[in-house]
Amino acid sequence: MNKIVVAVSGGVDSVVLLDFLVRFFRNKNGQKWLEENLIVAHFEHGIRGKESQEDCEFVRRLAEKDRLKFEFEHGNLGENSSEEKARNARYAFLRKIAKREDAIIFTAHHKNDLAETFALNLARGGGWRAVACFDSPDIERPFLRFSKLEILKMAKQQGLIWREDSTNFSQKYARNRIRKTLNFSEKDLESIFEIWKRQIELRREIEKITQEILFEIGDGQKFEREFFRTNSDEVCYEILREIIIRQSGKIPLSKQVWDFLHAIRTFKNGSKTQILGGYEVMFSRNHWSFISTIISTIISR
């Protein structure tokens, strides 16, 4: 089995996850396996000053109690850092460790997190992908089947102590506003969880079909225009979005995909355009193809 990197903030969710994993793997594989293969990872964002530093020290002591490896990083993101910036920095830290250790990441996301992310993504116009979230192949989320209330019960049953993040009560952050406004019931959470499971299955089926279509209509650099002229907007959007991601490594804005689709359908033979500000595309009568990537200094002009 791979090594495990456990993301531990010091809050109740991650403390319960760590406790569960320690007890499970100690019983299954023994203490020596734990000491060699379970890594406690803590990212100190630097958003809450002394409070953040105390969280880090708290998690360090949790790791030391069970003689586990402990990894941490100070982000120094500042008090005005956005939720997205903090999340990206945290996952970059976790993935850096996982890559080095050939490990899989475990996080303590639960049903409430799923419901809140669901609502946030829909509010931002995420479409069906808003529902098919929390599906990264390098991250395990074993608590998605549990609610916050159930995790709190686990914590009390095990006599655990944890830290409270003061920013969880701030209305500055959209997630906190969603949490307070919607106040999901246990029944709501279970319904959302079931919808999520079905959407994940649908997403994987869409990705499989997308791969098959991409193989049929192009070679990765050159693609048939006829496909994009004769199929529905929705199908073309999904295929084109995937092509752009594979070519650029970036997730395009919805408008960028729709504008590019319009160009594929209407631009004349011999025309050229750019996507994402730096990928040059040429159109022939029956095909379109990537022909160059403009250097970053030109992109920024």
Image (spheres, grey):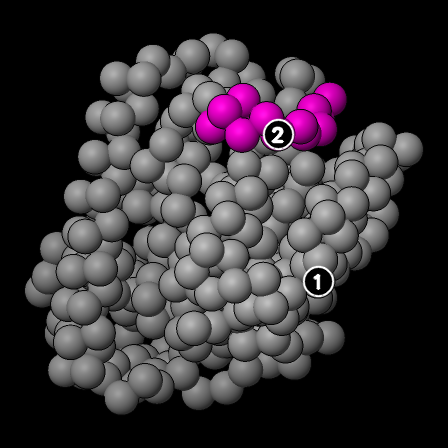
Is residue 47 covered in magenta? no
The residue drawn where x is 47% and y is 72% is 2
Amino acid type shown at disc 1 = Lys
Q: Examine the image and state in which quarter residue 246 appears.
A: bottom left
Earlier along the polypeptide chain: callout 2 or callout 1? 1
Amino acid type shown at disc 2 = Leu
Residue 94 spot, x, y in % from top left: 62, 60
Q: Residue furthest left?
A: 230
Element type at marker 2?
loop
Is residue 161 covered in magenta? yes
Q: Quadrant of the N terminus?
A: bottom left
The residue carrying mark 2 is 160
The residue drawn where x is 47% and y is 65% is 29
The residue drawn where x is 26% and y is 26% is 190
Element type at marker 1?
strand
Residue 138 spot, x, y in % from top left: 45, 64
Question: Where 233 sits versus 19, above or below?
Answer: below
Q: Nearer the viewer, residue 205 or 194?
A: 194
Considering the whole magenta stretch, tell me its main secondary structure.
loop
Q: CA distance from mark 2 to mark 1?
A: 20 Å
Horizontally, is 68 left or right of 185 in the view?
Answer: right
Q: Which mark is residue 69?
A: 1
Q: Quadrant of the C terminus?
A: bottom right
Residue 214 spot, x, y in % from top left: 21, 77
Q: Which residues are magenta?
A: 154-166
